[in-house]
């Protein structure tokens, strides 16, 4: 007979541990993490009832971050909440100069019926670049402040939210914002759609795929890097959650398409976790939403968003270590545009 979890509510507990990440932009980063959490029932779809994580890290390229993140997927009947506050420095921001960033965001989700939910998100991002060359021999600090909102419809038919083996997650919506930069000020709007699917081929093998699109004429300096996604926005155009064959945000533009497929297989399952291997192919295509040449030239002067419009396809392989239900560390190697890039990150790419 299968064991049943009869615990009605788990107490708050404390966990702390170090881990490493690696990327072409930041090098190797050592991170310390402290987690205050309440475990979910064993038969729940989520791994934690509530959790507040505090993290801090420093990298070999001089990047650093401090972050506080709260996740409350069982906030109330049909309600969930996520809140994030982060400060840090990126030594190589989108293949350009170093950037200092302040970020704050909050997202509230309300389940409508069955797998259908509606999510509302608001965020604030401030970015500054030091010693930017604005004319021959003249440098100054250039900054950008972005206020961003998003409303989305979510259809969640996954078997569970952690270590998903079957089902789908489909989402789409509308975003808007206001960007106040040193060189320009503008409002912007756009739409997005993202679909992910998982198929268990056997007890140890999972095939998963994802495709998404973000369309918007004026995405703003900060928002142009981001693919809106339910409680998991990610950097477009390169990186561990976008295209693992490119450096982070290497293909940023106003309209972007992302797609990929991944095959995961458990090699060794042990008490409390598993070791898995994966093979994947990632793709990204970014352009200026079909804008005319004059408009593109004007945007290039103020935003730098013009990039090669050809799709970049990146094949790769990797290995992951999973501890307990949802602590996952993944290392990948992928090739694109004549270069091979390595990422070490927490969690799956999707």
Image (cartoon, rainbow, N blue to C red):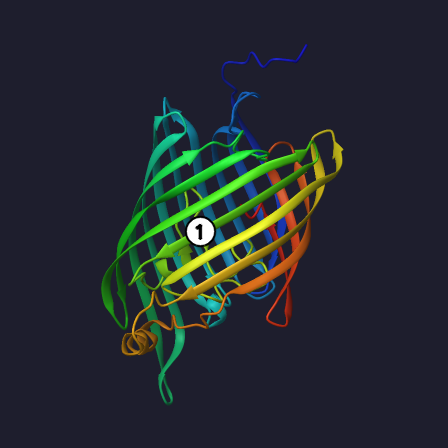
Residue occupying image coordinates x 30% and y 70%? 291
Viewer-side residue, 200 vs 78: 200
Image coordinates for residue 215, horizontal then vertical, percent: 34, 57
Image-quadrant location for residue 163: top right
Image coordinates for residue 320, horizontal then vertical, percent: 67, 45
In this view, the residue farthest toward the top is: 1
Looking at the image, residue 341 sits to the left or right of residue 211; the answer is right
Can the viewer see residue 254 in this picture?
yes
Tag 1 secondary structure: strand
Give the vertical position of 255 relative to 148 (above or below). Answer: below
Can the viewer see residue 241 in this picture?
no
Image-quadrant location for residue 151: top left
Q: Tell me the residue that label 1 is attached to.
A: 212
Q: How many marks?
A: 1
Image coordinates for residue 244, horizontal then vertical, percent: 58, 58
Give the vertical position of 249 relative to 132 (above or below). Answer: above
Question: Which quadrant is the N terminus positioned in?
Answer: top right
Residue occupying image coordinates x 61% and y 32%? 325
Viewer-side residue, 96 vs 33: 96
Residue occupying image coordinates x 61% and y 48%? 262
Image coordinates for residue 171, horizontal then vertical, percent: 40, 42
Sort mark 1 into few (<14), some (14-19) or many (20+) by Cα contacts within 10 Å.
many
Give the vertical position of 80 relative to 148 (above or below). Answer: above
Residue occupying image coordinates x 74% and y 33%? 269
Looking at the image, residue 322 sits to the left or right of residue 124; the answer is right
């Amino acid at each position: 007979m299968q064991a049943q979890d009869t615990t009605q509510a788990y107490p708050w507990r404390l966990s702390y541990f170090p881990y490493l990440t690696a990327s072409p932009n930041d090098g190797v980063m050592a991170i310390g993490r402290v987690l205050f959490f309440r475990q979910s029932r064993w038969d729940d779809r989520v791994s934690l009832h509530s959790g507040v994580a505090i993290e801090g890290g420093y990298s070999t390229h001089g990047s650093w971050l401090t972050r506080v993140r709260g996740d409350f997927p069982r906030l109330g009947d049909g309600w969930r909440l996520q809140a994030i506050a982060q400060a840090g420095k990126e030594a190589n921001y989108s293949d350009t100069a170093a950037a200092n960033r302040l970020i704050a965001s909050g997202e509230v989700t309300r389940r409508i019926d069955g797998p259908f939910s509606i999510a509302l998100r608001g965020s604030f991002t401030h970015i500054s670049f030091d010693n930017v060359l604005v004319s021959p021999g003249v440098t100054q600090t250039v900054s950008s402040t972005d206020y961003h909102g998003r409303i989305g419809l979510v259809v969640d038919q996954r078997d569970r939210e952690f270590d998903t083996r079957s089902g789908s997650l489909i989402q789409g919506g509308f975003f808007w914002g206001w960007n106040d930069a040193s060189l320009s000020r503008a409002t912007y709007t756009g739409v997005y759609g993202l679909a992910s699917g998982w198929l268990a081929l056997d007890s140890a093998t999972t095939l998963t795929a994802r495709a998404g699109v973000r369309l918007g004429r004026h995405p703003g300096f900060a928002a142009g890097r981001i693919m809106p996604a339910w409680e998991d926005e990610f950097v477009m155009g390169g990186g561990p959650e976008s295209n693992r064959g490119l450096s982070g945000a290497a293909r940023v533009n106003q309209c972007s398409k992302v797609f990929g497929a991944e095959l995961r297989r458990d090699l060794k399952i042990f008490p409390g976790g598993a070791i898995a291997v994966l093979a994947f192919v990632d793709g990204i295509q970014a352009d200026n939403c079909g804008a005319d040449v004059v408009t593109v030239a004007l945007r290039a002067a103020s935003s730098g968003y013009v990039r090669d419009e050809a799709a970049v396809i990146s094949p790769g392989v990797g290995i992951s270590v999973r501890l307990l239900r949802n602590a996952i560390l993944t290392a990948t190697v992928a090739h694109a545009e004549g270069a091979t890039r390595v990422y070490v990150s927490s969690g799956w790419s999707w």
